[in-house]
Image (cartoon, grey):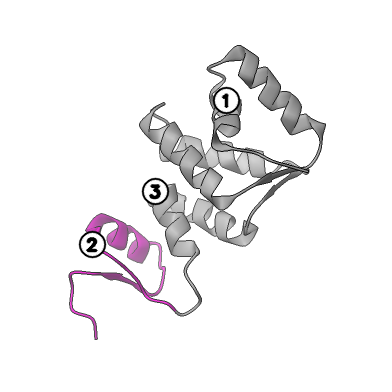
Amino acid sequence: MVAVDTNVLVRLLTGDDPHQTAAARRLLHAGPVWIAKMVLLETSWVLRSVYGFEESAIREAFTKLLGLKNVQAEDESCVAAALALTQHGIEFADAMHLSSRPPGAVFVSFDRSFVRHAKRAAVAGVSDAGAPRP
């Protein structure tokens, strides 16, 4: 099994460097691949901020990648929940933070847009950090 770094995923998903993209593809097809949650988080940031990927494109790329038989992500249920939340307008990074919280924990944020989207997605236990809590 190999654990891949962010730069391997970025090359694989953007194809911006032919030599490194080919190496990343060979690596992906050589055997079992493990991807840390933080690598996915960082990859989403790079794809969005450097390459201009939309959240839907990131979700689609990650869903295809993680759907491969030989690819395993750290805390797969958390990653799957985060990917599902992106369909409700929540950025992948915020969705990962939210889906990684301990059971029963209230998630608070000053990001009112994120809180609004989470509530629209029927996520329980999300609160505006600036609002009074009961």
Question: Secondary structure beneath disc 1?
Answer: helix
The answer for how far apart the CA atoms under marks 2 and 3 are is: 15 Å
Magenta range: 105-134
* Image x and y of residue 104, in percent: 46, 80
Amino acid type shown at disc 2:
Phe
Image quarter (top left, top right, bottom left or bottom right) of the C terminus: bottom left
Q: Left or right: where does residue 105 sit relative to residue 83?
A: left
Q: Residue at x 52, y 51 (%)?
A: 83
Mark 1 is surrounded, within 10 Å at the Cα level, by few (under 14), some (14 to 19) or many (20 or more) other residues, namely: some
Residue 16, how many percent across, how many down? 53, 17
Question: Looking at the picture, which amino acid does disc 3 mark?
Answer: Glu
Give the mark count: 3
* Residue for point 63% across, 55% down: 74
Q: Quadrant of the N terminus?
A: top right
Classify 118 as above or below 9: below
Q: Which residue is mark 2?
A: 110
